[in-house]
Image (tube, rainbow, N blue to C red):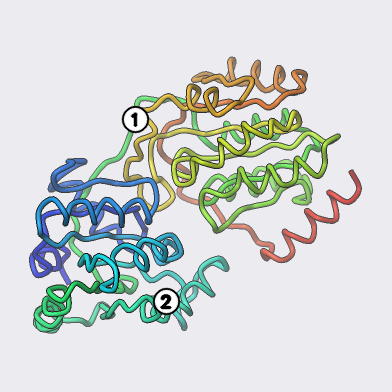
């Protein structure tokens, strides 16, 4: 189905969400039509944030908003759906558009398998009526279902369209870029060189894939790294948990701007605990690159300032390899919690692979290594 026809049939003029590769056609359509426009389209920090924002839109306008997300974000919407939107509370109607990663019978990455199995059931448990849209779904079928859904929305309940792979097509081409020169994979190589045999916790997406391939290229063991392939936004908290319990061992966290934004409160917890053995490196390209390149708000905020007010004793931003190498070495000698923001370009090589070890193997190898430290 053409994505423009999908949007026209739904008939909403306000969208907010967290980008998803399964919804790339919709994301590109919205960016082409609206860009980032507070009246019509906002890319939010996380899916719960989107849901609350959508509620505010409805309160102010009386109209029905759309929240789009990958199914991994269902966990983030449970609280606002159950305690804010639900018809037993404020009866706020919202249309959810959910990209179905890990759909049963469709090969996908390990972090999506269980989420894919429970995607529709979670919607049912939240009393959200759902309709699955696949490549074979016709506009007539969607229009008929939307007529049915409008009655549900008018009663103060919520509905969801679950989008299968390849269901939405004919999106306009949108180029995502910035003016930064440093390439993320090269940044990770520099971090690996500086960290030596220190453990690294890396964030969701291409950063972990590039870290894995850097170890392969260096003929190094993968035991040093915990690859946070799912649970976006939580790698820094994982690293904090490791650092607190291995106080004599330096721990590195390779983070991303979208992940930092998703659960920024974790920085306050890290800053409050001040583990002097944690080195937090945030690679900031101002984009949700792994799922298509749509922008985050990280290009417009002062991450160094955020870290400092959260209690990080030291925080700095760099945009050259010379400065990066200098700050990595200083961080190793400083013996206090440090944040290094690295300004990064958008893009990755086309032949970037994926980890060849399983998630369980990664966990066990990492734990075995930690037990020797």
In the rendered image, residue 334, in percent from the top left (x then y), is placed at: 74, 18
User: Which dot marks residue 178?
Assistant: 1
Quadrant of residue 313 in the image? top right
Q: Quadrant of the N terminus?
A: bottom left
Above or below 313: residue 163: below
In the rendered image, residue 358, in percent from the top left (x then y), is placed at: 68, 65
In the rendered image, residue 152, in percent from the top left (x then y), is placed at: 17, 79
For disc 2, the neighbor class at 10 Å (few under 14, some 14 to 19, many from 20) is: some
- Which comes sooner in the sequence, label 2 or label 1? 2
Judge left or right: residue 102 versus residue 47. Answer: right
Q: Residue at x 37, y 56 (%)?
A: 47
User: Mark 2 against mark 1, which lies toward the viewer?
Assistant: 2
In the rendered image, residue 253, in percent from the top left (x then y), is placed at: 64, 39
Instruction: State the CA–CA distance, disc 2 to disc 1.
Output: 37 Å
Location of mark 2 (residue): 122
Q: Quadrant of the C terminus?
A: top right
For mark 2, give the secondary structure.
helix
In depth, the one of 88 and 248 nearer the eye is 88
Judge left or right: residue 298 versus residue 213. Answer: left
Q: Residue at x 22, y 51 (%)?
A: 56
In depth, the one of 342 and 212 nearer the eye is 342
Q: Residue at x 35, y 45 (%)?
A: 293
Above or below 366: residue 210: above
Above or below 122: residue 221: above
Residue sitting farthest toward the right: 372
Residue sitting farthest toward the front: 89
User: Which dot marks residue 10?
Assistant: none
Q: Residue at x 49, y 75 (%)?
A: 107
Quadrant of residue 365 in the image? bottom right
């Amino acid at each position: 189905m053409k994505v423009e026809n999908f949007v026209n049939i739904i008939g909403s003029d306000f969208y907010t969400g967290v980008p998803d590769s399964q919804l790339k056609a919709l994301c590109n359509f919205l960016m082409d039509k609206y860009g980032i426009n507070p009246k019509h389209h906002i890319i939010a920090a996380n899916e719960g944030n989107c849901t609350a924002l959508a509620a505010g839109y409805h309160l102010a306008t009386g109209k029905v908003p759309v929240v789009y997300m990958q199914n991994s974000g269902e966990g983030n919407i449970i609280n606002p759906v159950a305690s804010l939107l639900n018809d037993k509370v404020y009866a706020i109607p919202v249309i959810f558009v959910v990209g179905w990663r890990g759909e049963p019978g469709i090969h996908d990455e390990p972090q999506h398998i269980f989420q894919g199995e429970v995607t529709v059931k979670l919607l049912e448990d939240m009393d959200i009526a759902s309709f699955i849209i696949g490549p074979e779904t016709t506009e007539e079928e969607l229009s008929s279902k939307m007529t049915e859904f409008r009655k549900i929305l008018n009663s103060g309940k919520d509905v969801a369209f679950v989008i299968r792979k390849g269901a939405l097509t004919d999106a306009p081409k949108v180029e995502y870029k910035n003016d930064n020169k440093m390439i993320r994979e090269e940044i990770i190589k520099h971090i690996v060189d500086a960290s030596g045999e220190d453990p690294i916790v890396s964030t969701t997406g291409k950063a972990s894939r590039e870290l894995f391939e850097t170890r392969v290229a260096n003929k190094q063991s993968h035991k040093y790294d915990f690859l946070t392939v799912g649970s976006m936004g939580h790698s820094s908290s994982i690293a904090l948990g490791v650092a607190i319990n291995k106080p004599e061992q330096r721990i590195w966290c390779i983070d991303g701007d979208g992940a930092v934004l998703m659960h920024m409160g974790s920085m306050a917890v890290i800053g409050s605990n001040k583990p002097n053995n944690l080195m937090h490196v945030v690679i900031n390209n101002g984009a949700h690159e792994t799922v298509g390149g749509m922008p985050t708000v990280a290009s417009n905020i002062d991450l160094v300032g955020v870290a400092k007010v959260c209690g990080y004793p030291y925080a700095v931003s760099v945009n050259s390899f010379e400065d990066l190498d200098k700050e990595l070495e200083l961080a190793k000698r400083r013996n206090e919690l440090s944040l290094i923001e690295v300004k990064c370009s958008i893009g990755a090589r086309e032949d970037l692979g994926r980890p060849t070890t399983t998630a369980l193997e990664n966990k066990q190898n990492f734990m075995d290594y930690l037990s020797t430290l």
